[in-house]
Image: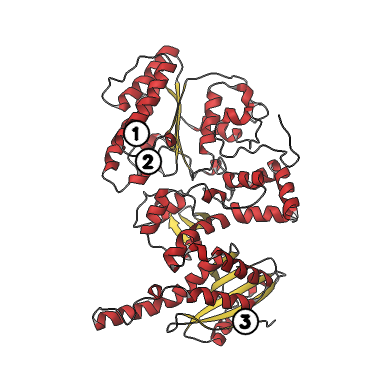
Amino acid sequence: MFEFDDMPVRYPIGEHNFRDLRERGCLYVDKTQLVARLLMQGKFIFLSRPRRFGKSLLLSTIESYFKGEKELFEGTWIGEREKNWKKYPVLHFDMSGCSGKNADTIEKFLNDRIARYETSYGVPNKEHLDDVGSRFNSLILNIYADTGCRVVVLIDEYDKGILETLDEPENKKMNDVLRAFYSQPKAATEAVQFCMVTGVARFGSYTLFSGPNNYYDISMNTLYASICGITQSELLGNFSDGIKLLSEKRKETQEDIIEALRQKYDSYRFTESEEKVYNPFSVLCAFAEQRMDNFWIKSGISKVFVKYLSQSEFDLIELQNLWVTRDRMEKKYSKEDSIPLLFQTGYLTIKDVEDSRLYRLGIPNGEVRSALVDQLIPLYTGIPENDFPLRLKRLQDKVKDGDVTGWIEDVRSVISRIPYRLFGPTDSNKEKEDERQDAKVKAIANYERTYHLLVHIIFQMLDLESQSEIEIAGGRIDMVVKTKKFIYVIEFKLDGTTSEALAQIDEKGYLLPWKADGRKVYKIGIVFSSKDHNIKDYEFLPKD
């Protein structure tokens, strides 16, 4: 095997086969203790996690365990404790391999997979049966009868295809096929040793499973908070070589690299437990390529996400501090409510929990913020994405350097290019005069928030630590932006004065949370003009 000084570790980028990963000597973050707990938890298990979070590798690990592949578990938690390696027949259906265009495509895909298992286990071919569900049931029962061993059923990405056709007529036919198939492990329960289903969407919102209560949903179970993803301790314990190489390449301390990784890829929280995880795909790519980029996003954005995001109305500022019930988080996707979609696909995560009833959701990290903003650039600003990179780089440098006048003027320049349609009706509106006036009043009432949202989006694009509408004892701070050297506390006013904005910062004690921070703190008042649709005036203290 070849060796390179700058590649001391083999990172399993996109690797979801446990056997291949172990035989190739790739780095493996040992999750087998959680696997062992899971196998003791129950017979029918369901897990929801965003794409590329390790669901497929988890099922492959379980498959290898039930196949008795002892040699693959050497050095793992299970490998050091399991004494009785029993082999079971395993039926593993990876639905990601199905195009899912229509019911016929899905049915053919499933029949092909069943036929392979019929041949592999030497059971009678039952292609003459009326539906794929009956054939699957026959397969399970025949294997059990012939081998005397209960069957292990693993179904990965169960929701492939159906989510992309939710509002289409073909969806009902597809559901009928899948319902007939997915209900069989329960129907043949006496012949099943273990069954696990994974996907992105929470299956409780869909009628694909006969008796969904028969499945134990561990998606929000605190015991399995880190079964997919990389914890902070796992990062430090498994990726020390990668951290060192990144540190040397970027000429930054290892502590700075760890903090940069945390800001970029960490803070996914799927349960009430406070334990957070990093996006595993992005972390592996960052170490393999020795750079930080939006790897998860660039690996593909779900068609469902784009479809429903473009049809839904929501406020990017609201997504930073949104309190919802658990029921809402687990609902079926719809264009009327984008929150279930954003949470289940990983664009929102749990930030706080109150009395196990209310959950505060927020954007997990810098990579996800970038993804949301990339989708919102044309939606909110109408400015082509290609026009931004150089402009944003200059703006980012000024914010980091403490050039307050410079970055405010740059923000003013960006806003000047935003289409007027975002600011409500104009005099060219052909509505009746009274209706036009009502609309105008409503638009003006929302102007300040519109400007606030635009500035917020601009700073999100800079990939800096920024937050809007922060609740403190004295009130609600409009916006705070943080860099390594500076903290900017910003108050916005519509058709007011900068002195009013600065006075509010002082009167409400907005600077107090950062009094002992050590960084230079600026208080900034920015006044927008409803007439000119831009920043009219600004003032900041202390003066440079």
- For numbered disc 3, what is the local secondary structure? strand
Query: In the rendered image of this protein, does residue 475 appear above or below residue 142?
Result: below
- For numbered disc 1, what is the local secondary structure? helix
| Quadrant, the C terminus | bottom right
- Whichever of callouts 3 and 2 sits on the residue coming sooner in the sequence is 2
Three-letter amino acid code of the residue under disc 3: Phe
The residue carrying pointer 1 sits among few (fewer than 14), some (14 to 19) or many (20 or more) residues within 10 Å by Cα, namely: many
Which residue of the protein is positioned furthest toward the left in this rendering?
432
Task: Give the side of residue 500 with respect to residue 156, left or right.
Answer: right
Residue bearing mark 3:
540
Residues marked 1 and 2 touching at CB (< 8 Å) = yes
Query: In the rendered image of this protein, does residue 115 appear above or below residue 312?
Result: above
The residue carrying pointer 3 sits among few (fewer than 14), some (14 to 19) or many (20 or more) residues within 10 Å by Cα, namely: many
Residue positioned 59% across, 29% down in the render:
20
Which disc, if any, is residue 18? none
Residue bearing mark 1:
106
Residue at mark 3 to residue at mark 2: CA–CA distance? 53 Å
Q: Nearer the viewer, residue 218 or 447?
A: 447
- Whichever of callouts 1 and 2 sits on the residue coming sooner in the sequence is 1
Residue bearing mark 2:
161
x%, y% of residue 509?
Answer: 60, 77
Location of residue 538 by image quarter: bottom right
Residue positioned 38% across, 58% down in the render:
310
Whether residue 19 is visible: yes
Of the residues tagged 1 and 3, which is closer to the observer?
Answer: 1
- Whichever of callouts 1 and 3 sits on the residue coming sooner in the sequence is 1
Residue positioned 39% across, 78% down in the render:
445
